[in-house]
Image: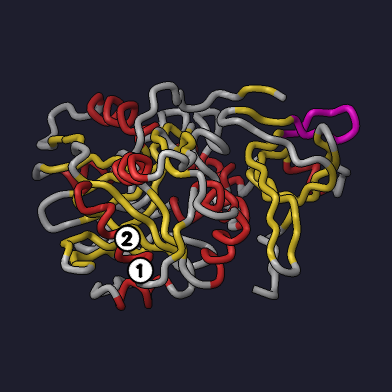
Amino acid sequence: MSTTPHLAETAFFSTPLSAQLSSRHPELAQRPYRGSLSPSGFSTQEAELQALLASSGLFDLGCRAFLRVTGDDRLRWLNGMVTNTVQGLADGQMNDSFFLNAQGRILGDAVIYRSADHLLIETDRSQSERLLAHLDHFIIMDDVELQSLDASASVLGIAGPHAASVLMKAGATVPEPMHFLFTSIHGVPVTLAQVYSPGVPRFEIQAPADKILNLWTDLTGDGAVPSGIDALEALRVLEALPLYGTDISDRYLAQETNQNQVLHFSKGCYLGQEIVERIRSRATVHRGLRQFELHGDVPQLAPGQSLPLTAGETAIGELTSVTRITLPGFTHILALGVVRSEAVERGQEISYPGGTATPLTSPPTFTGI
């Protein structure tokens, strides 16, 4: 087992929700997640994951951080700093993006929100300070101002096929995918966004931090199942969504992540674009992020740890996220990792310490929930 370069997570604070829940329930376990401490679970991972997949699960996203971008040059400037289009967004639209360095390596990821008079960059607390410093370095003669928003707001997430119904029951107007709007939930003004999700519908609720516990209580009363980070991480691996600082770092190029939704090839110049375009023109990368099914032991990986992948005696990659999925009629050990492309193309047997890893072409399907 090795430790790979990742975002330092040494000084954690509890999210507003986690702090309030822990004060009422001292037995509630918390775990570090994306720069903060959040509840690890409320019942069992299996029950909470089943809610996320089959009904609706409510979870803490107080780990999210926001940078506000204002100024007359904000659209042109930010469009030149990220891999996706900013100028192509309409007010009320959003998209996912990478920040790259000049060598095309990934410095971080974010969701970009466009409003009439400002842009909002949503990232993790584990990334926000580093990205703020990176972006500030490139404001030269531009009419652009960056502001790190304080902790007066926080975020909840709700996911599942019934998530929209729960939100509408609570009085919210529900946005279309990759759109956001200003609405209210049980009388509390919120920003509600339907974010990217390759599996189940997923929403984020941005609200005043002092109202987060009330919203949590009201939405669980409306039928959403309290879900912890353990279940949310299992869903992430099941959906094959990489996490920056765990599966992705500044060692990797954008196309090596297989996250095509973050790339826009006709938007114009941006930092790192030359490398992205060179890879596109050659139509190949030598390694890539893949989802695997594991056969053998279930390794426990701490943040930043990885397990080597080998084909015979040859090192060909690493596993970065692992979870056991146990659902009715469905029990699998799934993982994410980066592997050399030729090993997959040649059908070589891929091993990790404790078993073998089978690359999957798409996330597994299941029935019985």
**Residue 135: % across, % down:** 27, 31
* Residue 220 left/right relative to 186: right
Rendered residue at 55%/35% (across/down): 246
Give the CA separation, mark 1 to mark 2: 6 Å
User: Which label was assigned to residue 217?
Assistant: 2
Say what secondary structure mark 2 lies in: helix
Q: Is residue 15 magenta?
A: no
Q: Quadrant of residue 81?
A: top left
Quadrant, the N terminus? top right
Q: Which residues are magenta?
A: 308-317
* Residue 357 left/right relative to 262: right
Q: Is residue 313 magenta?
A: yes
Rendered residue at 21%/53% (across/down): 211
Say what secondary structure mark 1 lies in: helix
Q: Read off the residue under disc 1.
A: 221
Rendered residue at 57%/38% (across/down): 247
Q: Is residue 82 visible?
A: no
**Crowd around label 1: few <14 · some 14–19 · many ≥20 (10 Å):** few
In the rendered image, the vertical position of residue 173 relative to residue 356, given as above or below = below
* Residue 34 left/right relative to 239: left
In the rendered image, the vertical position of residue 54 relative to residue 44, given as above or below = below
**Residue 45: % across, % down:** 59, 53
User: Which label was assigned to residue 63?
Assistant: none
Q: Name which residue type carries label 1.
A: Gly
Q: Quadrant of residue 194?
A: bottom left
Give the color scheme: rainbow, by chain, secondary structure or one colour.
secondary structure
312 or 32: nearer the viewer: 32
In the rendered image, the vertical position of residue 223 relative to residue 340, given as above or below = below
**Crowd around label 2: few <14 · some 14–19 · many ≥20 (10 Å):** few
Quadrant, the C terminus? bottom right
The chief SS type of the magenta part is strand
Rendered residue at 17%/57% (across/down): 115
